[in-house]
Image: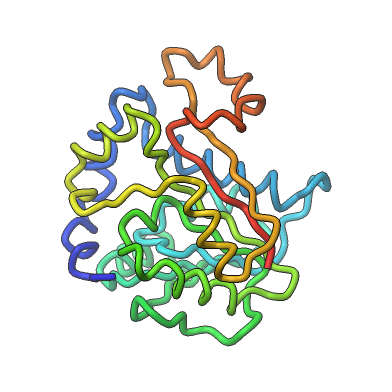
């Protein structure tokens, strides 16, 4: 992971992202909260109100997830980790305490074993060289508690609109999209169990009245994004 690539776009990340997703009719905040709502649903596991624990936002960058994390997990603690010092600095300026912003070297997470209850990554691993995925998933596995869970969100390379958006986005210039089945396999090879795939984001804002169907379409590999959720 090359911190220079992420530092280059740190200050204009949000504006570039906003311009790149105009076809969806939504702002970046919509997609950021979408992911945290999914995480909340998975963490609750049928027990609404559960929002405690320690969470790791792997590749948290400028803190895009922070306001929505605080909204949906008000009693939990969030640590954003990233290789980009510049991005983390912007995150601290924007959000500061109680969120922790921690730098790492792109290889070894600077936390003891069994530190976190949950880990998530929001469209990070398509920026990471595929040969590093196994090592980083193993690191995430290491820092999770024995009952820990992981959620990895990614762009779906089977969706042509997603592929077009990635191909025209300046900060995705070196992106390598990952098929959901491959991501699940890599997580399982790192030690995660019961990994399952769910496809998400099917309708643009112009078809928002159809979004009630999205929960019923999670099996369909045509969503703009997907996540893999597994247990340590």
Across and down, in percent, residue 195 comes to: 64, 54
Spot the residue most to the right: 47
Q: Quadrant of the N terminus?
A: bottom left
Question: Which quadrant does the C terminus fall into?
Answer: bottom right
Residue 102 lies, with reference to residue 44, above or below; the image says below
Rendered residue at 31%/57% (across/down): 127
Tell me the residue at 40%/33% (across/down). 158
Badge count = 0
Image-quadrant location for residue 151: bottom right
Question: In the depicted view, which residue is nearer to us: 59 or 18?
Answer: 59
Q: Residue furthest toward the bottom?
A: 112
Q: Position of residue 13 (x, y in %)?
A: 25, 50
Please state the horizontal and vertical placement of residue 190, each as a whole percent of the image: 56, 70
Which residue is nearer to you in this view: 198 or 158? Answer: 158
The residue nearer to you, when weighing 53 against 202, is: 202
Image height check: is 174 above or below 145? Answer: above
Image-based side of 14 in relation to 104, left or right? left
Q: Position of residue 72 (x, y in %)?
A: 63, 48
Residue visible at 55% across and 54% down? 184
Give left or right: position of 168 versus 66.
Answer: left
Residue depicted at 56% across the width and 67% down the height: 189
Give the colour scheme shown: rainbow
Viewer-nearest residue: 59 or 53: 59
């Amino acid at each position: 992971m090359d911190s220079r690539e992420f530092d280059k776009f740190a200050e204009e990340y949000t504006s570039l992202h906003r311009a790149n997703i105009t076809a969806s009719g939504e702002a970046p905040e919509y997609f950021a909260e979408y992911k945290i709502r999914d995480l909340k649903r998975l963490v609750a596991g049928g027990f609404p109100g559960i929002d405690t624990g320690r969470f790791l936002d792997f590749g948290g960058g400028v803190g895009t997830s922070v306001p929505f994390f605080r909204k949906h997990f008000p009693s939990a603690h969030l640590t954003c980790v990233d290789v980009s010092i510049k991005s983390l600095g912007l995150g601290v300026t924007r959000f500061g305490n109680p969120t922790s912003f921690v730098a790492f070297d792109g290889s070894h997470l600077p936390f003891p074993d069994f530190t976190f209850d949950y880990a998530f990554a929001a469209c990070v691993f398509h920026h990471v060289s595929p040969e590093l995925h196994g090592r980083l998933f193993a690191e995430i596995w290491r820092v999770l508690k024995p009952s820990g869970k992981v959620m990895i969100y990614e762009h779906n390379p089977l969706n042509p609109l997603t592929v077009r958006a990635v191909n025209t986005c300046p900060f995705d210039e070196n992106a390598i999209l990952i098929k959901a089945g491959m991501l699940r396999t890599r997580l399982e090879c790192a030690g995660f169990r019961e990994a399952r795939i769910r496809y998400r984001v099917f309708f643009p804002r112009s078809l928002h009245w159809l979004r009630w169907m999205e929960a019923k379409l999670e099996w369909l590999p045509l969503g703009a994004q997907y996540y893999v959720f597994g247990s340590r």
